[in-house]
Image (cartoon, rainbow, N blue to C red):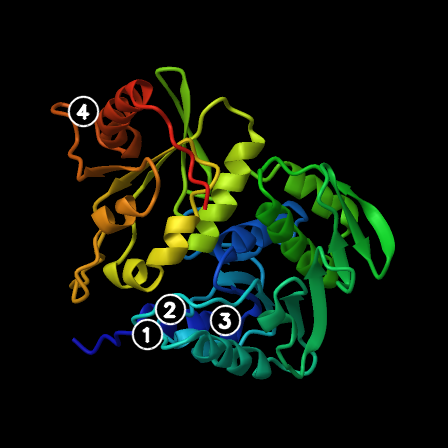
Amino acid sequence: MGVEVKTRAEALAGFIAEADSIAVGGSHGKTTVTHMTGHILTEAGLDPTVLVGDGSHSRAGGSRWLVAEVDESDGSLVMHHPKRAIVTNIELDHTDHFKDVDAVRDLFEKFVSALPSDGVAVLSADDERTRYLTTPARRVTYGFADSADYRCSEDRPFALQHDGHELGRINLRQRGRHNISNATAAAAMALEVGVSFADVASALEHFPGAHRRFEFLGLFQGAAVYDDYGHHPTEVRATLQAARELRHRRLIVVFQPHRFSRLAAFLQPFSRSFEGADRVVLLDVYSAGEDNPTGVTARDLASQIPGAIYAGSFEPPRGAPPGLAARFADTLGRVVERSSTTPAARPTR
């Protein structure tokens, strides 16, 4: 039919090249930072197009501004040539594609080295692999570190400083130290492109949250239920730290590992990432189409977490409406019932 077919990465690269673009990458946090940055620019009246990786909270704007999440998982990151970029952190993941963390860092080095000299690279000062990336663009660092150009505090509302001078405080609704860092990354980029601090603070105060990032689903038998996509040990730890800030009496974690390759590569780190949970329940691995050559399963992970329950798989209750909450309710009910009759053993590793 003569219709050109492009991959998602190829199409996105074309959009980024033609726009006044901000690309957001990193091993963790890029979805939230993309949404936050797009939200700030939208609230400030810049009317950007926003392309979030999972499709949620994306929007078609009417200006030349584009905020886009860019993915490193398959190496296509280097296809993108934005004018500005945010890199949140660099850590080994996607072990089906990368042999070690140096390969991941090399990819991000190539990405930021292609930024134009009149561009901006906003880099985490808290992550050693990120803060030393070299780029012809103007380097701007952010984070909790004393050396950060944009420095955030850990209290709430958190203070934001630029070059040692406090700009003000930001009242962020999203819990977790990692979300203060995410908000600071988005704020730094917005301030660099000319948005006022007042507009940045107002937008972040009203930020609704990213889809499946510690997203509140509702109450079930008196228990608050949250959904989070975190599928790496670092992300699991950050999510549990955020959950503990809510100061509920008990924290029950139901975890489904994502990909056999990731579980096999990070089995030991995963086993240590649930510290602080009162009960851990493991579901079967979501394979994402992968085979399982190592034979490692969720049952193996459960055996390494003190007091953990291996629940296997779950199916929607008969007659239940569609949606995650409905599919989850039957399993959660059985977990809550079982946990109430079994002494909790909080991991101590």
Decide: few, some or many residues near mark 3? Use Cα within 10 Å; few <14, some 14-19, many ≥20: many
Q: From the image, state whether disc 1 or disc 3 is nearer to you.
A: 1
Decide: few, some or many residues near mark 1? Use Cα within 10 Å; few <14, some 14-19, many ≥20: few
Q: Are the residues at dot 2 and dot 1 in contact (C-beta closer than 8 Å)?
A: yes
**In the rendered image, which residue does mark 4 sit on?**
320
**In the rendered image, which residue does mark 3 sit on?**
16
Decide: few, some or many residues near mark 2? Use Cα within 10 Å; few <14, some 14-19, many ≥20: some
Position of residue 98 relative to residue 40, above or below, is below
Question: Which one is nearer the viewer's eye here, 222 or 113?
Answer: 222
Q: From the image, state whether disc 1 or disc 4 is nearer to you.
A: 1
- Please tell me which of labels 1 and 3 falls first in the chain: 3
| Whole-number angstrom distance, CA of label 1 to CA of label 3 | 24 Å
Q: Amino acid at mark 1?
A: His
Taking the spot 77% from the left edge, 63% from the top edge, the residue there is 149
SS of the residue under disc 2 = loop
| Whole-number angstrom distance, CA of label 2 to CA of label 3 | 18 Å
- Please tell me which of labels 2 and 3 falls first in the chain: 3
Q: Amino acid at mark 3?
A: Ile
SS of the residue under disc 4 = loop
Decide: few, some or many residues near mark 4? Use Cα within 10 Å; few <14, some 14-19, many ≥20: few
Question: Which one is nearer the viewer's eye here, 64 or 26?
Answer: 26
Q: From the image, state whether disc 4 or disc 2 is nearer to you.
A: 2
Q: Quadrant of residue 303?
A: top left
SS of the residue under disc 3 = helix
Q: Quadrant of residue 53?
A: bottom left
**In the rendered image, which residue does mark 2 sit on?**
73
Q: From the image, state whether disc 2 or disc 1 is nearer to you.
A: 1
Q: Are the residues at dot 1 and dot 4 in contact (C-beta closer than 8 Å)?
A: no
